[in-house]
């Protein structure tokens, strides 16, 4: 009996090792957690049936009182039986997979055992099916009450199932004396080994699953911690300053050797190793980054050649590069570098993927917040214009003077004044308006200004036909025209001309407002649009607000361009969007 027990321990060790290797595969763990549906159950039936079939092949043949230790049992003598760990595979399938899986494993394992033959072939087949059904329902009921199967419970069930198998052998195997002799030899070793094996098998699986859950919990905590600290920075958008702060946070919490963030053209921030040649404001440097921007897919490299860095002494030999997206468009990359490829583990990959998705969401939220702020700024500007006493008094005084000289012209100016204020109200509530409405706003403003200063301004509009329904941000065109009239011309200039050019090319609308004024000082030009520029005639926020709104609505590739070759020309390009119902 002791000799048989030792041999059985060797057999169960094979199954336990297989279970250990299997538990480390991601696919098995996924199916173990989510076994709903026929596919998941079929996979578990296949796996645990394979365990039972291997147990049949590696069983120990018992003939009378003689124990035969053969390497592989392909056929069993009609007078012999097998001592094996088959019930352990059936039991694990039932406990972990439920009644359906238990029945499936029991049937396959039982049929295979019956085909091998032997004096107890039928008894063992019946006990396999019965064990599968019983352990399936037992495991289902236990999980419903206690949520998880414990190794101790699995050991008790294993002992019970082996005991049941011994009873079935005594009931069905013939002759009874031979059956009794067989049971007296194999009962205790098989009960002990299968009970212990069940305990060890389930302990290994649960330990690995628990370790994975702890790792996920730690990873989630780390991601949330990083998210909490990076959110204020990403609210500012994908800028050099915000990216540098974010890169420092990621580098500190993840332990990577270097972290980079880029937009579609250049490195915005780099922290850690390789800072001497991965320089912010320079080109993307690595070919891997170009590929990620092109495909929008996560890519990893485990050699310097795969990273494709042009610097021959780069210390970074592994990397994972994630796309940063906004509304489905790749707007940059997050790169985590390692000096050794072994640092790029699966845990680091999952962490990086989680961060990339989170940062993309943060960037979208930041853009939405910026749009809301810009719309609010525009609304405030419009409200200010409504109650601006200087503008209002000038318009009223002009109309009042005309009431005695030209009543019809005064009436028309009153209508233009109402159009001007109505446009302010309507535009303040929308992100985009049709070009036709923006032009109404411009014409209303110009009518009032030209009435105040007759024959001073010449306004020429060169607008391509069929663009009435093209959408653009409210107040942009009107503000550019107003800016030209208020700031472009010195007092003594007689011929003051403003041109408005609007045309389309490919899928874009090109807008330009040009004047023949005094131009802009070079030092002042560098600040325009990038920050408020205060002056005696205004707050200097108009161009800054326009630029920020263009960035918020269409991305940083859409911006204000200045040309001071002859006078001043301010232009921008936006993608064509057409008026929809209700706009």
Image: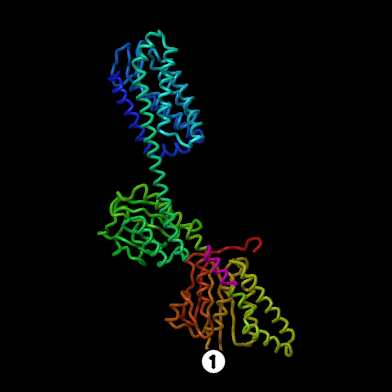
Question: Camera-side residue: 321 or 365?
Answer: 365
Query: Can the viewer see residue 537 in this picture?
Result: yes
Q: Is residue 529 found left or right of 85 in the rendered image?
A: right
Q: What segment carries the magenta color?
A: 368-379
Q: Position of residue 348 (x, y in %)?
A: 36, 50
152, above or below 59, in the image: below
Question: For residue 56, what is the image quadrant?
Answer: top left
| Residue 271 magenta | no
**Quadrant position of the C terminus in the picture:** bottom right
* The N terminus - image quarter: top left
What's the coloring here?
rainbow
Is residue 449 in view from this perspective? no
Q: Quadrant of residue 385?
A: bottom right
Tag 1 residue: 492
Compare residues 2 and 76 and report the one nearer the observer: 2
In the rendered image, residue 475, in percent from the top left (x then y), is placed at: 58, 73
Q: What is the residue that sits farthest to the left in this orientation?
A: 313
Q: With 498 as the anchor, is 188 left or right in this view?
A: left
Q: Position of residue 360 (x, y in %)?
A: 46, 57
SS at badge 1: loop
Q: Position of residue 25 (x, y in %)?
A: 38, 38
Q: In percent of the image, x 44 and y 16: which residue is there?
A: 168
Q: Does the segment drawn in magenta span residue 369?
A: yes
């Amino acid at each position: 009996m002791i000799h048989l027990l030792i041999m059985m321990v060797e057999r169960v060790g094979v199954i336990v090792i297989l279970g250990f290797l299997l538990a480390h595969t991601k696919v098995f763990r996924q199916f173990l957690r989510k076994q709903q549906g026929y596919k998941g159950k079929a996979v578990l039936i296949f796996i645990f049936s394979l365990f039972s079939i291997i147990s049949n092949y590696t069983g120990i043949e018992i003939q009378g009182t003689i124990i035969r230790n053969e390497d592989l049992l392909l056929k069993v003598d009609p007078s012999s039986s097998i001592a094996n760990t088959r019930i352990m595979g059936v039991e694990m399938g039932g406990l972990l997979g439920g009644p359906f899986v238990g029945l499936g494993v029991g049937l396959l394992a039982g049929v295979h055992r019956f085909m091998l033959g032997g004096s107890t072939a039928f008894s063992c087949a019946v006990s396999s099916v019965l064990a599968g059904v019983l352990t399936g329902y037992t495991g289902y009921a236990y999980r419903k009450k206690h949520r998880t199967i414990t190794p101790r419970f699995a050991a008790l069930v294993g002992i019970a199932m082996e005991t049941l198998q011994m009873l079935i052998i005594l009931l069905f195997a013939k002759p009874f004396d031979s059956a009794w002799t067989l049971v007296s030899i194999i009962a205790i070793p098989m009960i002990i080994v299968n009970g212990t094996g069940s305990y060890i098998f389930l302990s290994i699986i649960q330990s690995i699953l628990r370790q994975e859950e702890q790792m996920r919990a730690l990873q989630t905590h780390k991601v949330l911690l990083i998210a909490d600290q990076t959110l204020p920075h990403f609210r500012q958008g994908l800028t050099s300053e915000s990216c540098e702060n974010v890169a420092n946070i990621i580098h500190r919490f993840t332990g990577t050797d270097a972290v980079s963030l880029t937009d579609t053209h250049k490195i915005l921030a780099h922290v850690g190793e390789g800072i001497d040649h991965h320089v912010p404001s320079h080109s993307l440097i690595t070919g891997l980054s170009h590929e990620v921007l092109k495909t929008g897919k996560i890519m990893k490299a485990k050699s310097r050649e795969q990273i494709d860095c042009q610097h021959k002494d780069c210390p970074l030999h592994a990397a994972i590069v994630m796309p940063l997206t906004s509304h489905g468009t790749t707007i940059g990359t997050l790169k985590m570098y390692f000096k050794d490829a072994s640092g790029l583990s699966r845990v680091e990959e999952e962490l990086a993927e989680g961060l990339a998705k989170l940062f993309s969401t943060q960037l979208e939220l930041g853009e939405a917040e910026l749009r809301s702020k810009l719309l609010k700024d525009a609304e405030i500007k419009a409200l200010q214009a409504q109650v601006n006493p200087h503008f209002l008094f000038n318009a009223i005084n002009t109309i009042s003077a005309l009431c005695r000289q030209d009543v019809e012209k005064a009436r028309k100016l009153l209508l233009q004044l109402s159009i001007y204020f109505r446009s302010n109200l309507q535009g303040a509530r929308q992100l985009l308006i049709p070009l036709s409405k923006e032009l109404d706003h411009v014409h209303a403003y110009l009518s009032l200004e030209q009435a105040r200063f007759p024959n001073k301004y010449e306004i020429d509009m060169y607008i391509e036909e069929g663009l009435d329904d093209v959408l653009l941000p409210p107040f942009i065109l009107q503000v550019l025209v107003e800016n030209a009239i208020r700031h472009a011309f010195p007092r003594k200039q007689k011929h003051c001309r403003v041109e408005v050019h609007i045309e389309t090319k490919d899928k874009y609308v090109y807008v330009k407002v040009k004047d023949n004024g005094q131009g802009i000082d070079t030092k002042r030009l560098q600040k325009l649009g990038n920050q408020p520029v205060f002056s005696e005639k205004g707050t200097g926020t108009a161009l800054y607000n326009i630029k920020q709104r263009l960035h918020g609505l269409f991305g940083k590739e859409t911006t204000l361009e200045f040309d001071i070759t002859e006078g001043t020309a301010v232009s921008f390009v936006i993608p064509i969007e057409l008026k929809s119902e209700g706009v």
